[in-house]
Image (cartoon, helix red, strand yellow):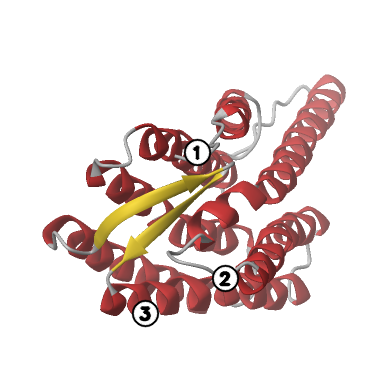
């Protein structure tokens, strides 16, 4: 483990856990906030699993755990896009179901095949994973295609969204994904070497996604507070009460 420091992963993971708890504890539509919280918890889970990977490099179970966690990021992000979309929701829902099924298949592969991930090497703040070639190709196709679906699907949904808050939510998701996908791919191209560093680099750059999701949560909570104040004012003038419900 040449020079690996777990501090960055631990601090990032703690912040992401705090963000997920904040999303669930505050006001707003739970249909929107739950997938946001799950994404933040998954990001935090990877950070903590990487610390375990680098603390016990000879124990492949932790490397498998890291892959199991990040496998569920794309389907969860697609669920968030479905919830926020107005037009194209059926298409996005079908895509989310497809990638969820693919995630299940990949998780079974990771758990069932002993040679999928053979070993790991940790350097500075990243981990490199040595992965079997067939799995590497299948996983890359799954992950990169799913990220493209999130980016372009959110863009199409944004174009058809009549609600300003929904458009901003979709923009936060899209920009957050682009904000970690592009730099991570650039690092992978520039710093080639033995093993695959992309999962580690992507999850560290995913702090950009986490910040975007923090903004989404704040916007959703402000929306809920605004509706509550409007409902209270309306109730005070008409004697009727109004409550917000999930879509």
In front: label 3 or label 2: 2
Q: Which mark is residue 174?
A: none
In the picture shown, does residue 43 fall above or below 136?
A: above
**Label 3 crowding class (10 Å Cα cut-off): few <14, some 14-19, many 20+?**
few
Q: Residue at x 78, y 53 (%)?
A: 165
Q: Is residue 123 visible?
A: yes
Q: In what element is the residue under mark 3?
A: helix
Q: In which quadrant is the N terminus drawn?
A: top left
Residue at image mark 2: 192
Q: Nearer the viewer, residue 39 or 124?
A: 124
Q: CA distance from mark 3 to mark 2?
A: 16 Å
Which quadrant would residue 177 be assigned to in this image? bottom right
- Residue 132 drawn above or below residue 223: below
How far from the left and from the top, in percent, is residue 168? 79, 56
Mark with earlier residue (1, 3): 1
SS class, disc 2? loop
The tag earlier along the polypeptide, 2 or 1, is: 1
Q: Gap in Å between the C-alphas at discs 1 and 3? A: 24 Å
In front of the other: 150 or 222: 150
Find residue 48 and report its image quarter.
Answer: top left
Taking the image as shown, residue 79 lies to the left or right of residue 85, namely left
The foreground one among 75 and 246 is 75
Residue at the spot 35% in from the left edge and 62% down from the top edge? 130
Q: Position of residue 133 (x, y in %)?
A: 30, 77
- Neighbour class for label 1 at 10 Å: few (<14), some, many (≥20)? many
| Horizontal side, residue 115 vs residue 203: left or right | left
240 in relation to 247, above or below: above
Q: Which residue is mark 1?
A: 47
Q: Which residue is mark 3?
A: 137
């Amino acid at each position: 483990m040449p020079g690996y420091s777990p501090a960055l992963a631990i601090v990032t993971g703690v912040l992401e856990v705090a963000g997920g708890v904040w999303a669930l504890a505050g006001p707003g539509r739970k249909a929107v906030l739950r997938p946001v919280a799950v994404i933040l918890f998954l990001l935090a889970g990877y950070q903590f699993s990487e610390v375990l990977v680098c603390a016990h490099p000879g124990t492949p179970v932790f490397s498998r755990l890291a892959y199991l966690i990040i496998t569920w990021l794309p389907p969860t992000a697609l669920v968030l896009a479905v919830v926020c979309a107005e037009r194209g929701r059926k298409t996005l829902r079908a895509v989310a179901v497809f990638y969820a099924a693919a995630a299940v298949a990949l998780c079974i592969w990771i758990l069932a095949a002993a040679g999928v991930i053979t070993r790991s090497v940790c350097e500075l703040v990243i981990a490199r994973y040595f992965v079997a070639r067939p799995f590497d190709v299948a996983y890359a196709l799954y992950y990169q295609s799913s990220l493209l679906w999130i980016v372009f699907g959110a863009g199409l949904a944004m174009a058809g969204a009549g609600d300003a808050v929904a458009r901003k939510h979709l923009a936060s998701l899209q920009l957050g994904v682009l904000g970690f996908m592009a730099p991570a791919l650039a690092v992978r191209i520039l710093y080639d070497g033995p093993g695959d560093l992309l999962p580690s680099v992507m999850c560290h750059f995913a702090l950009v996604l986490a910040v975007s999701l923090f903004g989404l949560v704040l916007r959703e909570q402000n929306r809920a507070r605004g509706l509550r104040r409007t409902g209270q004012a309306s109730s005070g003038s008409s004697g009727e009460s109004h409550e917000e419900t999930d879509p």
